[in-house]
């Protein structure tokens, strides 16, 4: 729903790389009828789908049609709709109204202070930390669905225990249904953005308590049908949204390891994709 890197933030951990710019103007980027139709058709093509998730390679609430799309999708299918957002625009009443029909909203909160917010999220100059917190609280008051709050933890930036205690106190004022801890798992925009180890994540989750879980470390997707050209195009579109390992792509598309490797090698030769090594893992990412 959003052009690549059209976002209110320029986060240090962003897997799409740094943009050096931020946006706050809500616009209509694509024909909303076409977007809704494509989502509905895809949803009806698969037998098992947990959620229809609206996200994108930027901040989805910058799309002024998001409320209309949510309504049209929910009128057509019974699958619950989730919105993955950084939460930066929830201070706007019109944004909160647009998301009211969603079944689950997953906003982010990576900081407990303005200084850490500026350091990690690098927001648009018009966005301020108190506005982020008030937006989250106002949305929770208005919204009857589930709120799953994601916290991205970065080593030596927001994982010291004083900051974690401040985060816990803030979370207690928002009344979320879940807190989900994540960390850097794909090549980040800045090399200074480093992962927090698993033992520390579990310790922090226990400290935060009620409903807090660690979600770092993998995901699953439906297999995608189609011929070889369709497979390459599908993978390329996936890589425009996030960097993936060979194993991720095999699991996501249903291809064999050898088929996936051959397809990726072709995309690399065509200079559509590049390989990046992070630690012991090799990721593939789309080239703009």
Image (tube, helix red, strand yellow):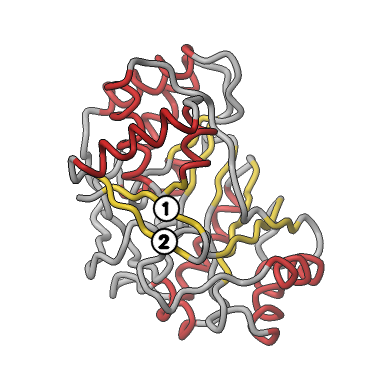
Work out how far the residue at label 2 is from the one at label 1, CA to CA, in angstroms.
6 Å
Q: Which mark is residue 277?
A: 2
In terms of secondary structure, where does tag 1 sit?
A: strand
Q: Is residue 230 left or right of residue 175?
A: left
| Residue closest to the eye, 136 or 34 | 34
Q: Residues within 10 Å of mark 2 (few under 14, many from 20)?
A: few
**Looking at the figure, which quarter contains the N terminus?**
top left
- Contact flag, marks 2 and 1 (Cβ < 8 Å): yes
Which x, y percent locates residue 114? 47, 82
Q: Where, by quadrant of the figure, is residue 33 drawn?
A: top left
Q: Residue at x 30, y 70 (%)?
A: 124
Which x, y percent locates residue 148? 63, 50
Q: Is residue 12 above or below residue 77?
A: below
Q: Residue at x 28, y 51 (%)?
A: 274
Q: Is residue 232 above or below residue 192?
A: above
Which x, y percent locates residue 11? 39, 68
The residue where tag 1 is placed is 283
Q: Residue at x 22, y 45 (%)?
A: 27
Q: Residue at x 55, y 84 (%)?
A: 156
Q: How many marks?
A: 2
Nearer the N terminus, badge 2 or badge 1? 2
């Amino acid at each position: 729903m959003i052009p690549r890197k059209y976002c209110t933030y320029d986060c240090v951990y962003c897997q799409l790389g740094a943009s050096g710019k931020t946006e706050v103007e809500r616009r209509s980027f694509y024909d909303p009828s076409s977007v809704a139709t494509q989502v509905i058709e895809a949803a009806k093509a698969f037998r098992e789908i947990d959620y229809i998730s609206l996200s994108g390679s930027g901040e989805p609430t910058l799309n002024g049609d998001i409320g209309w799309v949510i309504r049209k999708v929910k009128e057509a299918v019974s699958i619950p709709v989730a919105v993955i957002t950084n939460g930066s625009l929830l201070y706007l009443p019109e944004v909160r109204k647009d998301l009211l029909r969603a079944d689950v909203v997953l906003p982010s909160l990576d900081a407990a202070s303005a200084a850490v917010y500026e350091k990690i999220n690098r927001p648009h100059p018009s966005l301020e930390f108190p506005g982020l917190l008030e937006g989250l609280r106002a949305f929770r008051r208005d919204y009857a669905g589930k709120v799953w709050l994601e916290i991205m933890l970065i080593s030596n930036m927001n994982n010291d225990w004083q900051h974690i205690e401040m985060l816990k106190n803030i979370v207690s004022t928002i009344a979320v249904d879940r807190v989900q801890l994540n960390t850097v798992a794909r090549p980040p925009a800045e090399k200074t953005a480093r992962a927090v180890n698993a033992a520390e994540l579990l310790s922090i989750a226990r400290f935060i308590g009620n409903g807090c879980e660690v979600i770092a470390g993998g995901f699953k997707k439906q297999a995608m049908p189609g011929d070889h050209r369709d497979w390459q195009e599908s993978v390329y579109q996936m890589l425009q949204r996030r960097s993936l390992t060979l194993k991720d792509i095999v699991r996501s598309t249903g291809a064999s390891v050898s088929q996936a490797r051959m397809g990726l090698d072709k995309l690399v030769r065509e200079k559509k994709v590049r390989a990046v090594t992070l630690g012991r893992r090799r990721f593939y990412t789309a080239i703009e």
